[in-house]
Image (spheres, rainbow, N blue to C red):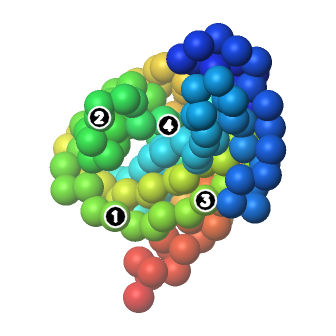
Amino acid sequence: MKYFYCYNCGNRIKYRDIDSISRGYCENCDIIFYENPIPSVAIIAENQRREILLVKRNVRPGIGKWCLPGGFIEKGEKVEESVHRELQEETGLLCKFPKLFSVNSINNGYYGDIILITYSVTLENFNICAGDDACDAGFFSLDLKPEIAFDLHNDLINKWYVQNSK
């Protein structure tokens, strides 16, 4: 995300090399505009047949393709709270026992740099009702999974199956 004007004084921001990175800087206020990664979550959940939960995207990027449920962490929200909220918004499902599975970064994606914090969860129910950014949701075996929108999600799914097939 590029900044053009200072949020403090309204002056035009200039970009210059600060700490070996091109950063926005307001000469009037002496403020550096850091462009930090956006924190987000992904959720790995499975049903009794060990099929993984996926949602079909209804928004860009990856519209029409499938991915793990998840999304951006809201301001003032704890990471685990976003896991519960995103799962319920996208699938109608409730979960318990969120357990950290993986932390990754995606550079220069559709929304800029993202930190993806992935949790595995135990589902409390299995009555799926797609909503929010998802137009469909379902459980899939590794052999029959649909086209996955994001390479990192595909890697996470494969990693999950490898770690849980022992």
Amino acid of disc 1: Leu
| Residue 24 visible, this angle | yes
Mark 4 is surrounded, within 10 Å at the Cα level, by few (under 14), some (14 to 19) or many (20 or more) other residues, namely many
Q: Which mark is residue 100?
A: 1
The answer to whether the residue labelled 2 contacts the one labelled 4, judged by CB atoms less than 8 Å apart, is no
Q: Is residue 50 above or below residue 54?
A: below
Quadrant of image for the N terminus: top right
Q: Residue 77 shows which numbered tag?
A: 2
Labels 3 and 4: the sequence-earlier one: 4
- Label for residue 71? 4
Is 31 positioned to the left or the right of 122 in the image? Answer: right
Q: Earlier in the sequence, mark 2 or mark 4?
A: 4
CA distance for labels 1 and 4: 16 Å
Q: Locate the C terminus and report the quarter of the image it occupies.
A: bottom left
Is residue 29 shown above or below 20? above
**Element class at badge 1:** strand
Mark 2 or mark 3, earlier in chain: 2
Closer to the eye: label 3 or 4: 3
- Mark 3, Cα crowd under 10 Å, few <14 / some 14-19 / many 20+, is some
What x and y, as percent, mark residue 52? 47, 55
Real-space Cα separation, disc 2 to disc 4, in angstroms: 12 Å
- Of 19 and 77, nearer the camera is 19
Looking at numbered disc 2 in the image, what kind of residue is underneath it? Glu
Can residue 154 be seen here? The reply is no
The Cα–Cα distance between marks 3 and 1, rounded to whole angstroms, is 15 Å
Residue beneath label 3, please?
Answer: 105
Q: What is the secondary structure assignment of the residue under circle 2?
A: loop
Marks 2/3: CA distance? 20 Å
Q: CA distance from mark 2 to mark 1?
A: 17 Å
Which residue lies most toward the top here? Answer: 10
